[in-house]
Image (cartoon, helix red, strand yellow):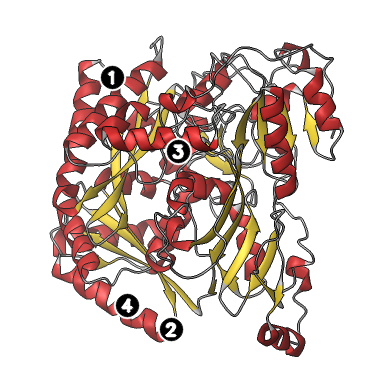
C-alpha cells in the first residue's frame, strides 16, 4: 500500500481493500521526496537473517561478535555495535572478584554446538510435508534451526543449552511470509493434528517458547521473522501497519527515514518482535511519552483455528462491548498468531536530552519519583537505581587517566564532605527528555526542582546517557557470568506507590536471608524503579550468586526466586509488569485473578482453539487441556530434509 492510501474495509475473503485518501494523495504528489522506498509494496527487510544462528549466539544473548570476555587479566567488551565496545574494563573485573567472588582461573566450559547427527529425529508425518510442499511456505527439519527456536532466555533454558540437557525441541520450523501463509499453516496444523508454537524474536524470559515435554503431536515452530514489512504509513492519522514478525530495531529504523517513531523501546528492542510485544503486553523505556503497547495498538489481526479475529474499523475509541484486543494482548501464543498490527506513530522529537540526579538514599529517590508521577511531569524515561546497582553500573566504565581519576575523586569529595552524602547509601536516577526544545527545557526545570526538594543533586547528562545505553549490554553479562560459575537473572513486578519502597527493601532482605541460610557466600541482589504511573511503579530486581561447588545451581536459584515472588505478592506486588506469565509464573495466577476470571480465559481458549493447536501451555495449564486427543497423529516418518 502506498502512503497515499489509508486503511479501508475488508472483503469477504478477509483481504484488505484500500480507499484512496485524496488529501494524503495530494500531499504525496506534492512531496519532493518519494515515499515508496519505505513501503515499496511492502519491501522486506530484517537486520537478522532467516537462519538467525548465523549472527546470533546459539546458547546465549545477542550477537556473536558482541559480548564480555576475559583476556590478558581483564574483562573487556568486544565488537563495535555498542558504545561499550572494544573497552577494557578493569573496574568491572575488580567488582566481579570482590562482590561475587569471581575466579577467572576457574572456567565452567559450555558444551560445543551440537553436531547435525546429535539432534533428535523430527516426528513429522508425510501428510504434513506434502501439505507444506503444495505451498510456497519454506520449512526446515535441520536440528540447529529447531534448537534455536526451542527456547527463550530464562536462566533455566540457557543453562540447559550450555550443559546439553535440553529435553524437547520442535520437530519442524516454518517461515510464513504473509498473513495468508499463516492462515494456511493454521489450517494445515489442525488438519494434520499438529501443534503450532509462534516464535517472534525469541527473547522471552518466561519459558513461553519451551515445548511441552509430554506433547506427543508434531510440534511446529512458526517463525514470523519473514513477515517483516511495514505495509503502509498513514501520515494524516499518524498510524502505520506492520507485520507481526518485524523487529523493533527494524520498524524504528524504517520509520525514522520518514521522520516518525513508535517510541516503543523495550530493553530487548533490538531482537524482539512487534507480534511478541502485543502477545506479552510489553512495556518500553519511553512509555511516559509514547505509552505501553496497549496504548499504541489501534488494530490487530490474529489468526486462530476458528478464523481471523479483528475489528472492522480503525478508530481512536469505540464502545462496542468488551474490547477483543484485550484478550489478544497478553495471550502469549495460546490462541493464535498475530500477523498484522496497526500502531500509533509520532514525529521524531526535535530535542533529545539526557540527565541524572544523585540522591542521598533510596527512600529519597523513591519519594521524588512518586512526586514526579503525582504532578504528571515525567520525562520520557526516569529510572532510579539503588546503591548496589549504582556501584555495579559505575564499575562498567573505561579506565581513567590521571585527570579522570582526579576529577572522580573531587566529585566524591564534594558529595561526602560538602553535601554529607554516604557513598554506600546514595542512589541515582537517570533521565531522558524528548520533545520540542522549549518543552524539554521546562520539563528539566520541573524535574530538577522536585529532585532538589528531596535532597537530589543534578549529576550530569553523561551519566544519564551512559545509564540509559548500558541497558542494552547488561543482558550480555549473564553469558560471561556463567563462564565463571555465576548464575544471574532479572525479575520484575508492579506495585502501588504506598508499598514501593517497602517491597524493594523486603524482597532484597528476603533474598539475602535465603542465600545466607543456604551457605551462599557471594551473592548480589539489587533493584531499580523503571516505570512510574499515577498509582504505582514498575520495579526490576537483579539477582546473582557464585555457585562454585554447587551441584544444581539453577534449582537453587529458582527456589530462591520463587520465594522472592511470594514476598513480592505479600507486599502487594504483581505477578509481572511486562515479562508475562509463560510457564514459570503460572502457579501464581490463581492468586492474581479470581476463579470465574480463569474460567473465562479457559472458555475463550475453547472457543477459538477447541483442538488445542496452540498448545504451548502458557498462562494456565488448563488452557492446554481442551484438545480431545494428544496422541500422535503421524502416519509415517520421513528422511531429514528442508525446503529453504
Mark with earlier residue (3, 1): 1
Which numbered circle lies on residue 604?
A: 3
Q: Is residue 316 left or right of residue 148?
A: left
- At mark 2, the secondary structure is helix
Mark with earlier residue (2, 3): 2
**Vertical side of 514 occupied by 241: above or below:** below
The residue pinned by badge 2 equals 437
The residue pinned by badge 1 equals 520
**Vertical side of 210 occupied by 444: above or below:** below
- The x, y position of residue 344, in whole percent, is 52, 67
**Marks 4 and 3: which is nearer the front?**
3
- At mark 1, the secondary structure is loop
Which residue is depicted at the point 25% across and 25% down? 563
Neighbor class of circle 3 (other Cα within 10 Å; few <14, some 14-19, many 20+) is some
Neighbor class of circle 4 (other Cα within 10 Å; few <14, some 14-19, many 20+) is some
- The x, y position of residue 576, in whole percent, is 34, 41
Question: Could you give the CA–CA distance between mark 4 and mark 1, rounded to whole angstroms?
Answer: 45 Å
Evaluate if marks 2 and 4 touch, with contact meaning CB atoms under 8 Å apart. no
- Residue 197 can be seen, yes or no: yes
**Marks 2 and 3: which is nearer the front?**
3
Amino acid at each position: 500500500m502506498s502512503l497515499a492510501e489509508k486503511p479501508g474495509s475488508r472483503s469477504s475473503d478477509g483481504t484488505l481493500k484500500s480507499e484512496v485518501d485524496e488529501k494524503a494523495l495530494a500531499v504525496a504528489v506534492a512531496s519532493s521526496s518519494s515515499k515508496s522506498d519505505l513501503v515499496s509494496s511492502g519491501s522486506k527487510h530484517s537486520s537478522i537473517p532467516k537462519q538467525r544462528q548465523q549472527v546470533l549466539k546459539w546458547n546465549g544473548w545477542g550477537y556473536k561478535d558482541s559480548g564480555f570476555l576475559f583476556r590478558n587479566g581483564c574483562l573487556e567488551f568486544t565488537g563495535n555495535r555498542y558504545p561499550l565496545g572494544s573497552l577494557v574494563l578493569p573496574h568491572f573485573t575488580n567488582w566481579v572478584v570482590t562482590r561475587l567472588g569471581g575466579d577467572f582461573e576457574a572456567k565452567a566450559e559450555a558444551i560445543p554446538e551440537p553436531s547435525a547427527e546429535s539432534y533428535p529425529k523430527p516426528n513429522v508425518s508425510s501428510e504434513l510435508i506434502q501439505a507444506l510442499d503444495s505451498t510456497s511456505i519454506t520449512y526446515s527439519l535441520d536440528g540447529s534451526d529447531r534448537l534455536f527456536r526451542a527456547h527463550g532466555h530464562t536462566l533455566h533454558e540457557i543453562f540447559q543449552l550450555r550443559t546439553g540437557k535440553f529435553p524437547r525441541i520442535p520437530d519442524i520450523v516454518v517461515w510464513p511470509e504473509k498473513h495468508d501463509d499463516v492462515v494456511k499453516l493454521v489450517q494445515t496444523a489442525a488438519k494434520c493434528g499438529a501443534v503450532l508454537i509462534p516464535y517472534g524474536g525469541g527473547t522471552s524470559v518466561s519459558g513461553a517458547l519451551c515445548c511441552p515435554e509430554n506433547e506427543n503431536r508434531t510440534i511446529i515452530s512458526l517463525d514470523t521473522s519473514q513477515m517483516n514489512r511495514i505495509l503502509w504509513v498513514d501520515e494524516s492519522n499518524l498510524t502505520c501497519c506492520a507485520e507481526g514478525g518485524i523487529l523493533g530495531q527494524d520498524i524504528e529504523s524504517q520509520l525514522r527515514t520518514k521522520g516518525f517513531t513508535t517510541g516503543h523501546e523495550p530493553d530487548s528492542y533490538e531482537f524482539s518482535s512487534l507480534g511478541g510485544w502485543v502477545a506479552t503486553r510489553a512495556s518500553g523505556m519511553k512509555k511516559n511519552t509514547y505509552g505501553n503497547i496497549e496504548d499504541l495498538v489501534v488494530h490487530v489481526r490474529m489468526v486462530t483455528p476458528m478464523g481471523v479475529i479483528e475489528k472492522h474499523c480503525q478508530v481512536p475509541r469505540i464502545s462496542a462491548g468488551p474490547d477483543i484486543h484485550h484478550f489478544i494482548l497478553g495471550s502469549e501464543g495460546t490462541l493464535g498468531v498475530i500477523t498484522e498490527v496497526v500502531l500509533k506513530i509520532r514525529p521524531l522529537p526535535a530535542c533529545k536530552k539526557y540527565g541524572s540526579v544523585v540522591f542521598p538514599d533510596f527512600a529519597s529517590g523513591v519519594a521524588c519519583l512518586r512526586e514526579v508521577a503525582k504532578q504528571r511531569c515525567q520525562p520520557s524515561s526516569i529510572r532510579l537505581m539503588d546503591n548496589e546497582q549504582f556501584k555495579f553500573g559505575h564499575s562498567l566504565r573505561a579506565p581513567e587517566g590521571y585527570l579522570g581519576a582526579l576529577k572522580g575523586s573531587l566529585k566524591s569529595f564534594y558529595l561526602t564532605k560538602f553535601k554529607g552524602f554516604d557513598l554506600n547509601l546514595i542512589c541515582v536516577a537517570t533521565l531522558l527528555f524528548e520533545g520540542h526544545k522549549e518543552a524539554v527545557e521546562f520539563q528539566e526545570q520541573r524535574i530538577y526542582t522536585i529532585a532538589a526538594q528531596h535532597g537530589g543533586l543534578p549529576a550530569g547528562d553523561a551519566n544519564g546517557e551512559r545509564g540509559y545505553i548500558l541497558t542494552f549490554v547488561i543482558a550480555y553479562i549473564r553469558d560471561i557470568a556463567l563462564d565463571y560459575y555465576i548464575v544471574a537473572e532479572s525479575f520484575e513486578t508492579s506495585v502501588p506507590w504506598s508499598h514501593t519502597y517497602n517491597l524493594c527493601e523486603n524482597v532484597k532482605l528476603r533474598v539475602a536471608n535465603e542465600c545466607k541460610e543456604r551457605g551462599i557466600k557471594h551473592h548480589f541482589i539489587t533493584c531499580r524503579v523503571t516505570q512510574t504511573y499515577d498509582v504505582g511503579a514498575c520495579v526490576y530486581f537483579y539477582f546473582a550468586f557464585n555457585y562454585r561447588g554447587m551441584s544444581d545451581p539453577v534449582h537453587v536459584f529458582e527456589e530462591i526466586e520463587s520465594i522472592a515472588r511470594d514476598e513480592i505478592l505479600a507486599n502487594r506486588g504483581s505477578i509481572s509488569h511486562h515479562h508475562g506469565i509463560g510457564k514459570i509464573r503460572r502457579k501464581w495466577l490463581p492468586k492474581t485473578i479470581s476463579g470465574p476470571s480463569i474460567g473465562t480465559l479457559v472458555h475463550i481458549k475453547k472457543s477459538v482453539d477447541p483442538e488445542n493447536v496452540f498448545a504451548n501451555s502458557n498462562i494456565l495449564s488448563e488452557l492446554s487441556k481442551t484438545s480431545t486427543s494428544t496422541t500422535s497423529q503421524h502416519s509415517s516418518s520421513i528422511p531429514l530434509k528442508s525446503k529453504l
